């Protein structure tokens, strides 16, 4: 087959065409598409947040986007792209499970998430992934009202396959696949070792990574371009450290050490909330203050 | 920006504490509950079962059910008696005969209802009473993990096992059953729900016996509907009637929810959404979403009551809540079937969170004309220092194929799982919401409650509470309402309808008060209330009108019945 013919054949492949099309789309919108897919799958197939969920969604989205618009205008004199706030709003809707009909965790959580980007900063960069910070904070200060999504959407393979397939493709397209895969590999290795060390069955210890909480964690939180460190290898080292911290938290839970319940509930979130900012802080110190870092509003929760 | 940011965090902490603060009016609920178990001579202690060693790792979970209580008047002396089930081989069930002087004696052995927990037969999970042969004596079905057992009341003292002759010998791992007359032929039919599929839990061929989803499991046992064809015989009409769901049903209740005169069925399913089966004039049941599909949870019990004096039967379904880990939230579903063919969930705040809640019942404990709610809770109380919740959170995040295998679960050991939870007594404050007054009124136990039943045990116009606790002693709380309030109760006897009048509904009207109640054929979790219907009247000194909707379709009106007494009503012939 000639080169020309091969080119024609390749461009006729629907998968290739889709990949090429994907290259032309702003990566931020691919991420927004992915989280919207997770939301729609969860709700349409499993009614995951029920009728009341629409109120929660509207509130979380509204507060996140309004806060982003207001604070960016106040801080920079212009309203930044609200795509980041959109992802934060959906993440909070999916992840926060409140007591009764409480709506305030979505409003306050949305505000805390977005405001953290403007308050908890170092050298013009925020240190925490906004959704991660908001959920960790709510779990710590409001444990009587807030829990986090811990079970699966339907616990079936099909849903997992859809989300993981799109997630991995989009992670590759956005250039963060190495972060995702490093975390997954480290999680599997460390938690297998932990299970063996404790004499526990391996499968239950690695099972959580198939859950939706981890889907949001590995596709949206640990890959947030605004809060990861610079450099591919450093990013992989940091994500290994996050997985190690998570394993340590889980080990402490296994041993019944007196941690706040929140750590038992969402060890991954607290691993990121503790390791991520330190790594980012050290990375920013390493870099020149006038480095090529963009505005806070373009980051991803 | 920092000030509002940190203020928001402080506000979250403040709101978190505020959600659970009791309002001041909770100090004066208008009644007290006294633990008079020992004084009444009730010494029943439930014992949990043991199963095949292959599932020993999860046995505390699998064996965490079986404590039930049901109310009956088996000897027809006008005093409510109590039946408790046990769940370990060779441990007896107890039938407490009410002596009428505030004390009870256990006559299960002489009645032939004690030794029902035997290898090859199964262990008791609960019982429902009803006069299935219309001979004016209350019979009983004991449902088990194993074969159900139907006993005919021979003479008000002795019972005869008629399971085989009745055609009911089907192995079914059941946690509830209800009597209802779905075809209005005057004979009580039987709906038996299933939890685990029909495996022998003592001789398992596989350890893959658990649910395959935490929210949408459909691999449970098949519920069965038995039609009473007279002559003390039943036929299995499950498939024909379309009620053979394989969700993990833990509780069922029946009433005419849509006002068409036919008994419908409401199911609380573990690991799945609730289900409502509407009765199509006795020809079939139609599964109707009615808004129940939108929140899939872990339904533990369903109880029926008129929550806000609208003259309709609403449904309260208990679920699991554990601080920090999981808020599945209880449902108080307002019946709007005649207006919009839906139930609307209005539970929030304290009412939504009763811990790992099990049995619940509506009852007017202060006789003010509105229903309170008594909710028991707590799953496994073992080592206080060790919680299984962390392990549970790991397995809950797994794929269904993993956790349907009991061998994959982290072993329970002696961990607690939502143990030592105090019961809740929710005071109904109308539009101001519900507030927990358990401590104030004296409901102070922290047992692992399962079944709870209500009955006026001393015929004095008060709603006493009887609680069956898992692997623990039963508790009797005597209700002492404010004496200034009036009341009325009705004892119904069917003629065209079944003699027990199960499924009959009464709507009472007194001034601004309207209240509907249904004669109980089994409700809550593993329980059955006194079939006499009790209404508090507050300061109202008369009843304007009472309308009785008999299962036969006959409607009967009573005008100005005498209050502060139990009124006996026999169904008219036409």
Image: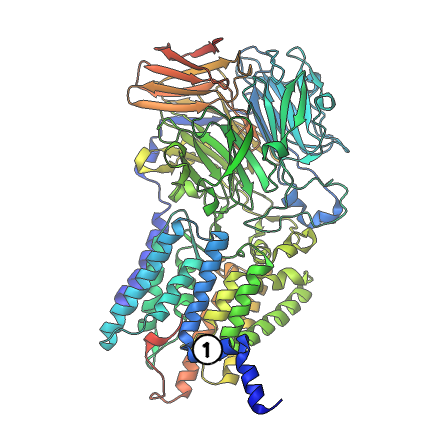
Q: Position of residue B9 (x, y in %)?
A: 33, 61
Mark 1 residue element:
helix
Residue positioned 62% across, 70% down in the render: A188
- Which residue, given by chain and number where applicable, does mark 1 sit on? A21
Instruction: Please identify the quadrant where the N terminus of chain B is shown.
Output: bottom left
Q: Position of residue B125 (x, y in %)?
A: 64, 32
Q: Is residue A64 above or below residue A231?
A: above
Q: Nearer the viewer, residue A30 or B164?
A: A30
- Residue B480 horizontal side relative to residue A108, left or right: right
| Displayed quadrant of residue B542 | top left
Q: Position of residue B142 (x, y in %)?
A: 65, 27
- Residue B32 horizontal side relative to residue B357, left or right: left
Q: Position of residue B489 (x, y in %)?
A: 43, 16
Q: Is residue B417 above or below residue A238?
A: above
Query: Chain ID for label 1?
Result: A
Q: From this viewpoint, is residue B368 visible?
A: no
Q: Is residue B333 above or below residue A269?
A: above
């Amino acid at each position: 087959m000639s080169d020309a013919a091969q080119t024609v054949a390749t461009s006729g492949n629907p998968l290739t065409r889709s990949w090429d099309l994907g290259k032309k789309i702003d990566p931020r919108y691919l991420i927004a598409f992915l989280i919207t897919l997770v939301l729609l799958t969860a709700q349409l197939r499993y009614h995951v947040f029920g009728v009341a969920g629409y109120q929660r969604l509207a509130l979380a989205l509204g507060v996140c986007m309004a806060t982003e618009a207001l604070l960016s205008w106040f801080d920079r004199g212009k309203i930044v792209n609200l795509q980041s706030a959109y992802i934060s709003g959906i993440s909070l809707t999916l992840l926060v499970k409140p007591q009764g009909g409480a709506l305030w965790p979505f409003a306050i959580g949305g505000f805390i998430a977005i405001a953290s980007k403007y308050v908890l900063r170092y050298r013009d960069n925020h240190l925490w992934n906004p959704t991660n910070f908001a959920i960790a904070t709510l779990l710590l200060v409001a444990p009587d009202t807030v829990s986090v999504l811990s079970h699966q959407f339907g616990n079936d393979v099909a849903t997992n396959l859809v989300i993981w397939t799109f997630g991995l493709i989009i992670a590759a397209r956005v250039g963060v696949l190495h972060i995702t895969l490093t975390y997954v590999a480290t999680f599997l290795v460390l938690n297998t070792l932990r299970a063996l060390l404790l004499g526990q069955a391996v499968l239950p210890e690695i099972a959580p990574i198939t859950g939706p909480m981890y889907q949001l964690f590995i596709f949206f939180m640990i890959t947030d371009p605004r809060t990861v460190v610079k450099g591919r290898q450093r990013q992989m080292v940091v994500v290994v450290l996050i997985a190690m911290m998570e394993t340590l938290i889980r080990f402490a839970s296994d041993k019944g050490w007196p941690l706040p319940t929140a750590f038992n509930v969402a060890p991954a979130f607290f691993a990121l909330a503790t390791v991520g900012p330190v790594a980012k802080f050290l990375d920013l110190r390493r870099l020149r203050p006038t480095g090529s870092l963009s505005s806070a509003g373009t980051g991803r929760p | 920006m920092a000030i509002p940011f940190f203020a928001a965090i402080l506000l979250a902490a403040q709101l978190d504490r505020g959600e659970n603060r009791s309002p001041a009016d909770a100090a004066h609920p208008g009644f007290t509950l006294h633990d008079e178990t020992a004084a009444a001579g009730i010494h029943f202690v439930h014992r949990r079962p043991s199963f095949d060693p292959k599932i020993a790792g999860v046995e505390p979970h699998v064996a965490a059910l079986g404590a039930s209580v049901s109310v009956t008047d088996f000897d027809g002396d006008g005093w409510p008696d109590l039946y408790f089930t046990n769940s370990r081989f060779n441990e007896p069930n107890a039938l407490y005969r009410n002596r009428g002087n505030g004390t009870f004696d256990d006559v299960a052995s002489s009645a032939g209802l004690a030794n029902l927990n035997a290898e090859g037969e199964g262990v008791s999970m609960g019982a429902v009473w009803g006069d299935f042969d219309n001979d004016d004596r209350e019979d009983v079905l004991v449902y088990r993990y194993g074969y159900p057992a139907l006993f005919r009341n021979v003479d008000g003292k002795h019972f005869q096992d008629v399971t085989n002759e009745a055609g009911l010998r089907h192995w079914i791992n059941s946690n509830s059953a209800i009597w209802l007359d779905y075809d209005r032929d005057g004979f009580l039919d039987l709906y038996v729900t299933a939890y685990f599929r029909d495996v022998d839990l003592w001789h398992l061929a596989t350890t893959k016996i658990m649910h395959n989803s935490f929210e949408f499991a459909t691999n449970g046992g098949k519920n069965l509907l038995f039609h009473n064809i007279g002559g003390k015989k039943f036929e299995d009409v499950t498939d024909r009637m379309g009620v053979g769901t394989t969700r993990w049903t833990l509780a069922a209740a029946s009433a005419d929810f849509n006002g068409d005169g036919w008994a419908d069925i409401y199911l609380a399913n573990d690991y799945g959404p609730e289900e409502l089966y509407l009765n199509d004039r006795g020809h079939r049941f139609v599964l109707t979403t009615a808004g129940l599909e939108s929140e899939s949870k872990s339904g533990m019990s369903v109880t029926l009551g008129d929550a806000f004096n609208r003259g309709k039967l609403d449904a309260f379904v208990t679920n699991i809540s554990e601080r920090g880990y999981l808020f599945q939230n209880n449902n108080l579903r307002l019946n709007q079937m005649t207006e919009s063919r839906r139930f609307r969930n209005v539970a929030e705040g304290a009412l939504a969170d009763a811990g790992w809640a099990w049995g619940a019942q509506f009852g007017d404990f202060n006789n003010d004309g509105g229903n309170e709610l008594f909710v028991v809770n707590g799953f496994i109380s073992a080592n206080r220092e060790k919680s299984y919740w962390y392990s549970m959170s790991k397995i809950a995040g797994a794929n269904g194929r993993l956790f349907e295998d009991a061998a994959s679960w982290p072993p329970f050991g002696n961990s607690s799982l939502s143990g030592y939870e105090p019961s809740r007594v929710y005071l109904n404050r109308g539009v101001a919401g519900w507030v927990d007054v358990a401590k104030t009124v004296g409901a102070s136990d922290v047992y692992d409650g399962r079944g709870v039943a209500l009955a006026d045990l001393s015929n004095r116009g008060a709603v006493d509470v009887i609680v069956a606790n898992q692997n623990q002693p039963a508790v009797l709380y005597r209700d002492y309402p404010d004496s200034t309030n009036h009341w009325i109760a009705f004892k119904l006897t069917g003629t065209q309808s079944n003699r027990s009048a199960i499924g009959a509904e009464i709507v009472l009207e007194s001034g601004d008060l309207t209240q509907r109640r249904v004669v109980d054929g089994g409700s809550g979790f593993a329980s059955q209330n006194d079939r006499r219907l009790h209404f508090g009247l507050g300061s109202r000194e008369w009843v304007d009108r009472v309308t009785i909707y008999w299962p036969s379709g006959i409607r009967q009106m009573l005008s100005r019945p005498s209050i502060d007494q139990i009124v006996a009503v026999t169904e008219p012939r036409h």
